[in-house]
Image (spheres, grey):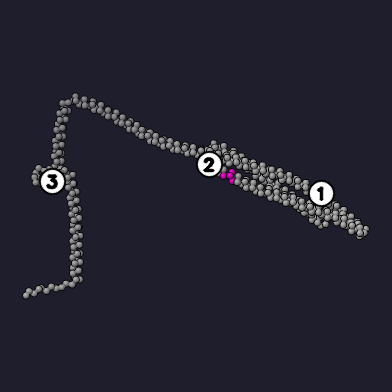
Amino acid sequence: LIVPPVVDEIPTNELQEQIKKLQEKLNTTQNKLSELNNANLQLKNDLKLANKYLQQEIGDGFESLHTFSSNPGNWRGRAQIICDLQQKNSDMKEKLKALQEKSNSTGSESNISLIKMESKISLLSKENSDMKSKFDGLKRKYEASQARIKTFENDCTLLKTKLTMLQQQSDRDQDIISTLSAQISNSKNSQTTVLNHKERTINKLEKEKEQLVKELEEYKSVITNLKNELKGAKNDICKFNDNSETNNTTIVNEDSQASNDALNRLKKEKDHLLELLGKQNDRLNSEREAHAKTQALLRLEKQKALKAEALATLESNTGRSSSYSLNSHTRPMDYSLKNQLELAEETIKALKTRLEIEQFERKQDIEEFAKLLKLENKDL
């Protein structure tokens, strides 16, 4: 019989803790691997940059360097090449000096010709420099003239726009002037019609006043005659009272009939006068209403005139340069309007004073008539 080995049972909590620790270790190792990979990539990039700089410095790539490392005797760097070239340069300079010495000793004639050529070349170089300086000056002038031309073109466009604006403003001013002239003509016509109507009403009122004055004088004469008749009748009654009763009764009856006739006449005259006064009051009320209407019309005309003056001032302030001649034409029209308005106001004031005087006279006539009626009632 084979006895199986006894295995200690590990609790689950410990297993979970061990698994967590192992996972943490695995995570740390993975992080380190990622960091190493990043460092490796950075080193590769640095190597690539180093290869580029080496190729720029040496002039060969890595493949040729590996080939040169196999046989290093034949390969030469840039520094060695520079040294060889410097040495060759010094050798060539020495040879050139030797050749110049030989040429100086043998070629004096060639030197003279060279001197002449050098003098000609110097003169030509001076002329060339002068021509260059002149050319530079002309070029600068040309550029300055082009800049001026551009500025003049811009100024021309601005002036054109201003001219169009001024033309539009002049057209607007002409339209406004035409409308104002039409309004002024309308206001003149309305003022003339109102003044004519007022003159007609004044003439009518004066005629009616004269007629009323005549009628009042006639009524006054009638009333005085009636008073005299009443006084005579009273005196006759007083005389006949002393004679006899019978005679007195007959005379009293006759006198009473006469007084009744006189009273009836007075009542009729009174009613007629009251009717005339009522008609006159109605006429006065109608005239007052007409006067109020005319005042309202005058106010409207004043407002229109003020608006027109305000518009004219605004237009003159905005476009004085463009519409100076137009304003010179509109100013006398404004002055004529002002004069006409002042004349209309004066006529209205005169009409008001006439109406007030007529009203006062009529009130006095009515008071006198009332006093006369009261006296007659007392006498009766």
Q: Are marks 3 and 2 in contact (CB under 8 Å)?
A: no
Q: Which residue is mark 3?
A: 63
Q: Which residue is mark 2?
A: 315
Q: Nearest the camera: 109 or 208?
A: 208
Any part of residue 282 in sight: yes
Where residue 95 appears, as percent x and y from the top left, is 14, 33
Q: Are marks 2 and 1 in contact (CB under 8 Å)?
A: no
> Alpha-carbon distance for marks 3 and 2?
92 Å
Where residue 115 appears, as percent x and y from the top left, is 22, 27
What is the span of residues highlighted in magenta in the rendered image? 303-307
Q: Is residue 14 rendered to the left or right of residue 68?
A: right
Q: Which residue is mark 1?
A: 221
Q: Residue at x 15, y 32 (%)?
A: 96
Where residue 189 appears, as percent x and y from the top left, is 62, 41
Q: Is residue 181 rendered to the left or right of residue 29?
A: right
Amino acid at dot 1: Ser
Local secondary structure at mark 3 = helix
Amino acid at dot 3: Glu
Quadrant containing the C terminus in the rendered view: bottom right
Q: Residue at x 62, y 47 (%)?
A: 296
Local secondary structure at mark 1 = helix
Q: Nearest the camera: 104 or 153?
A: 153
Q: What crowding class fits label 3: few (fewer than 14 Cα within 10 Å), some (14-19), or many (20 or more)?
A: few
| Labels 2, 1: front one | 1
> Alpha-carbon distance for marks 2 and 1?
70 Å
